[in-house]
Amino acid sequence: MEKTAYIVGAGLSHYAGLPLQSEFTRQILAARGYRRGPSRKMVKLLDDFVHDVFHLRKAADPSQWPDLEDIFTFIDLSANTGHHLGPKYDPKQLRRIRRVLIARTIRMLHQRFEKARKKETSQWKELLRFVHKLDVGQARFISVNWDTSLEAVLTHCHPNASLSYGAGIRPASFGDHGKIRIVKPAYRQKIKVSKMHGSVNWLYCDSCRDVFWFPPEETLKVASQIVRKEEIGSATGLHCCNCNMVELSTRMATFSFRKALDFPMFRQSWMTAEQKLRSCGRWVFIGYSLPAADYEFKHLLKRVELARTTPPRILVVSGGTDSERTLRNYSGLFGRLVADGDTFFREGLTNKTIDLITT
Ligand SMILES: [Zn+2]
């Protein structure tokens, strides 16, 4: 197999049982019906916020909710400049709502992933077949998702290889009494994944600025870390292993139109992604529609593509009902480098497309 950069989006996580972005709100609010537990309390806080700010009645149908992009963008635009969003929500409150929304999303993604794994849906099996066939030594992954379904499947199918998110993002495990431990990779063979928008299994120290990553299947512990104990009653309170006093936190470039990408922990990912795009002969896009909000990533793709002496061979595996628009997005960015039926496939992961992209 030639060296290949796999650039993956939400469509790939969908194979692992995760909802598409259009279904996120409904899935997040599914916890309204829970009898107990932190998710129920989180959704209550979110319902109150949407009621206060967007004038929706409480327990309104998810289809009436504002877009998550709008919620995150409004919070960021106000809180990041030190402003209120209405009299009730000061920057501290807004950041709390943001954390709760992220924590609830992580829990929802985890639940959906576990459900698909246990049920072994047909899509799940397709995803496994693709990942099994990969030569991980030649594969380089660039993900715009912040869920860890890809990493969980990769480490499941290739148990003798260790995940690597690139230099400066250190593998760690959860220790006792709120401590974390740095761990050594178990295997020399690496599965290289760059995450352009951060990851739900990463925690960040605001003091020393180190980034730590935890096993992809332990995202619930990260979710518990994001929301403080006094807010919801489920926090674990993990501290940096360099700076004992400092609680670790998370940073993710969420569904906001203002993705805060100039953050140190993202810079490293973007640099390794650029190296991968330069060095790989083939760029394979899977389940990624090139949305307008990702303009900075699209600019990176275009910049690297133009700077190469030979252009990359581009293959696109698309699917779903929106593939016509996705094709237009790819044709708009890459012109003749992408051709419908020849290098652009609308049928998703099938025997044919899996063979094409793994050999
Ligand atoms: Zn630190």
Image: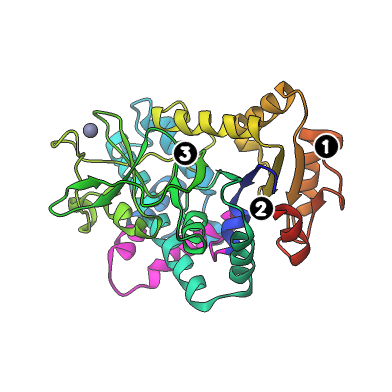
Mark 2 and mark 3 lie on one chain; the one further toward the N terminus is 3
The spot of residue 159 in percent (x, y) is: 45, 61
Q: Which mark is residue 287?
A: 2
| Residue depth check, mark 2 versus mark 3: number of the one nearer the observer | 2
Q: Is residue 9 visible?
A: yes
Q: Residue at x 68, y 24 (%)?
A: 303
Q: Give left or right: position of 84 versus 314.
A: left
- Relative to 274, residue 318 above or below: below
Instruction: Find residue 288 and report its horizontal and vertical position in percent.
Output: 66, 48
Q: Nearer the viewer, residue 229 or 62?
A: 229
Q: Position of residue 127 (x, y in %)?
A: 61, 64
Q: Which residues are magenta?
A: 16-44
Crowd rating for badge 3 (residues with CA inside 10 Å; few <14, some 14–19, many 20+): many
Residue 35 belongs to magenta span: yes
Camera sees residue 258: no
Mark 1 touching mark 3, by CB under 8 A?
Answer: no
* Element type where label 1 sits in the image: helix
Q: What kind of residue is marked 3?
A: Ala
Q: Nearer the viewer, residue 31 or 234?
A: 234
Q: Earlier in the sequence, mark 1 or mark 3?
A: 3
Front residue of this view, candidates 355 and 324 = 355
Q: Which mark is residue 337?
A: 1
Counting other residues with Cα less than 10 Å from the Cα at mark 2, is it few (<14), some (14-19), or many (20 or more)? many
- Residue beneath disc 3: 253
